[in-house]
């Protein structure tokens, strides 16, 4: 279920007379059961176990998708997507992981996995067709990843404790992969 479907449903309800409400409710229930339709943003949050996890999300544009899975305690996510066809897949497991993600452009993708405790991520993209994949597994890893341009890719894997990376990529058709391991 997405917030945008509920907003659209509410707006339609106001425009329709009271005599049509029964029909509108039936149509609304059908709309809510459809995963997506053209011109909308999709958000899906799953909090499985734990507590005090938070998600703050802003999506402006067309066909932006965000899938968020949180389990554990006090995990935090702030996500902003502006543009068209941007995707964010976020998984946070553990305690006190945090992520701040911003995407401005079209066809941008972020895949973030945080497994452990106290991992932090700052991710920003501006452009078209670029992607960032960050996998943090362990404790107290830090990553700041930014890219500006078109069709760039960054892949970072952090395993263990206390890894740190700051990465800025500017240009077109660039691809980098980094793996850090600190037992």
Image: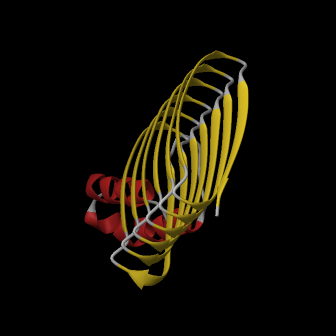
> In this rendering, would 79 be left or right of 139?
left
Residue lying at the far top of the rendered structure: 171
Depth check, front residue: 96 or 68: 96
Residue lying at the far bottom of the rendered structure: 49
User: Residue placed at 73% from the left, 37% from the top?
Assistant: 177
Percent position of residue 30, x then y: 55, 67
Image: 148 above or below 137 = above
User: Residue placed at 71% from the left, 21% from the top?
Assistant: 174
Depth check, front residue: 94 or 49: 94
Q: Hey, which quadrant is residue 130 in on the image?
A: top right
Percent position of residue 92, x then y: 52, 66
User: Residue placed at 72% from the left, 19% from the top?
Assistant: 173
User: Residue placed at 69% from the left, 32% from the top?
Assistant: 153
The quadrant of the rendering that contains the C terminus is bottom right
Q: How many marks?
A: 0
Percent position of residue 123, x then y: 48, 40
Q: Hey, which quadrant is residue 50 in on the image?
A: bottom left
């Amino acid at each position: 279920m997405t917030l945008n479907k509920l907003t659209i449903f509410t707006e339609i309800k106001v425009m329709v007379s009271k005599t049509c409400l029964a029909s509108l409710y039936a149509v609304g229930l059908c709309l809510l059961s459809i995963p997506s339709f053209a011109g909308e943003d999709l958000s899906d949050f799953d909090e499985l176990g734990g507590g005090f996890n938070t998600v703050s999300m802003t999506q402006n544009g067309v066909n932006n998708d965000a899938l968020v899975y949180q389990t554990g305690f006090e995990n935090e996510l702030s996500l902003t997507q502006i543009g068209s066809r941007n995707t964010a897949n976020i998984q946070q497991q553990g305690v006190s992981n945090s992520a701040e993600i911003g995407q401005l452009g079209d066809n941008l993708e972020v895949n973030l996995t945080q497994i452990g405790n106290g991992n932090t991520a700052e991710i920003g993209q501006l452009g078209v067709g670029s992607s960032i994949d960050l996998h943090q597994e362990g404790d107290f890893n830090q990553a700041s990843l930014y890219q500006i341009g078109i069709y760039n890719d960054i892949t970072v894997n952090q395993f263990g404790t206390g890894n740190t990376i700051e990465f800025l990529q500017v240009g077109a058709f660039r691809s980098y992969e980094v793996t850090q391991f600190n037992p």
